[in-house]
Amino acid sequence: MDRFAIPASKSARTSVCFPGVGTRRFLLAEAVFFILSAAAAFSLSMAGSAHATENKTAVAAEVGVETGAAAEPTRRPRYLLVGPDGRTVTNDRFYGRWQLITFGYTFCPDVCPTTLVEIAAILKDLGADAEKAQAIFISVDPERDTPAVLDNYTRFFDPRILGLTGSPAMVKGVADQFRVRYEKVRDPSHPADYYLVDHTAGIYLLDPDGALVTRFPYMQPPNEVADKLRGYFSGRS
C-alpha cells in the first residue's frame, strides 16, 4: 500500500422516466432534466479540475518545486546509511553523479518490486548514459532488511541498484530529509511479527550537486523517465 494514490473516478448514468404524464409535461420535464444534467456535468468538471490542480500542487510542494507562487529554496537531502558491505554510505559519495532514489522494503508485495523493475528498465534504456546515474533503494523496514538481505534483493533486479539500510533512527532521519512517509500496518489475523509498511512511492532525482530536482511518480513509463533523464543530463530540461 502506498500514499498519494489517486482513486479512479466512477461515473453512473441515470435513467429517468415520467410515467402517466402528457407530452407537454414530458417535454418540460425532459428539458429540466437536460438543464440539470448539464449543470451537474459542469460542476463535476470544475471539481475534477480543482482536484487535479490541488493534487499537482501537493506533489510539487512535497518535492519542493515551483508551483506558480514563490519557489521553495533548493533542497539538498542528506543521508548516512549502511551499504551491502556494512560500511556507511553518505550522499557525498555520489557527488558529481545523478541519483535515482526510491524507498521501500524487501517484503513489499507489489509496489517495490514494480518500481525496481522500472528502474532496471530505465538503466537499460539509458545505455551508456546510465553511468551518469546511481540507482539507490532505501529500506523503510530496517528491522528485517539487513544489508545482506537488501543486497540480494536489489541484485535480483539489477546489480547496479544499491540497497541501503540502517538503524530505525537513521532511516527516519533520511525519510524526513526526503519528506517520505511510512508506517507499519498490522493485520490482527496474522502473527504479531507480521506487518506491511505503508510508504511513499516514486523515484526521487538528485542532480550532481545533490539538489532535489523532481520525483517521478509511481508507474511512470520507464522510457518516458529515461527520455527526461537524457534531457537533464544534457541540460535541456
Image (cartoon, rainbow, N blue to C red):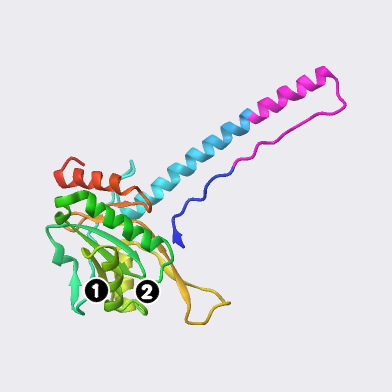
Is residue 102 depicted above or below 106 in this figure? above
Highlighted magenta segment, given as a residue range: 11-37
Location of residue 33 (image quadrant):
top right
- Residue 132 rendering spot, x and y as whole percentages: 14, 54
**Residue at the far left in the pictured view:** 96
The answer to whether residue 46 shows anywhere in this view is: yes
Asked if residue 138 is positioned above or below residue 128 in the image, the reply reads: below
The residue beneath circle 2 is 141
Q: Secondary structure at mark 2?
A: loop
Give the residue furthest to the front.
156
User: Going by the picture, which residue comes out furthest to the top?
Assistant: 24
Residue 10 percent location from the top left of the image: 58, 44
Residue bearing the label numbered 1: 81
Neighbours of disc 1 within 10 Å: few (<14), some (14-19), many (20+)? many
Residue drawn at x 42%, y 62% is 110
- Badge 2: how crowded within 10 Å, few (<14), some, or many (20+)? many
Image coords of residue 224 (percent x, y): 29, 44
Amino acid type for the residue under numbered disc 2 = Asp
- Helix, strand or loop for disc 1: strand
Q: Reply yes or no: does residue 12 show up in magenta.
A: yes
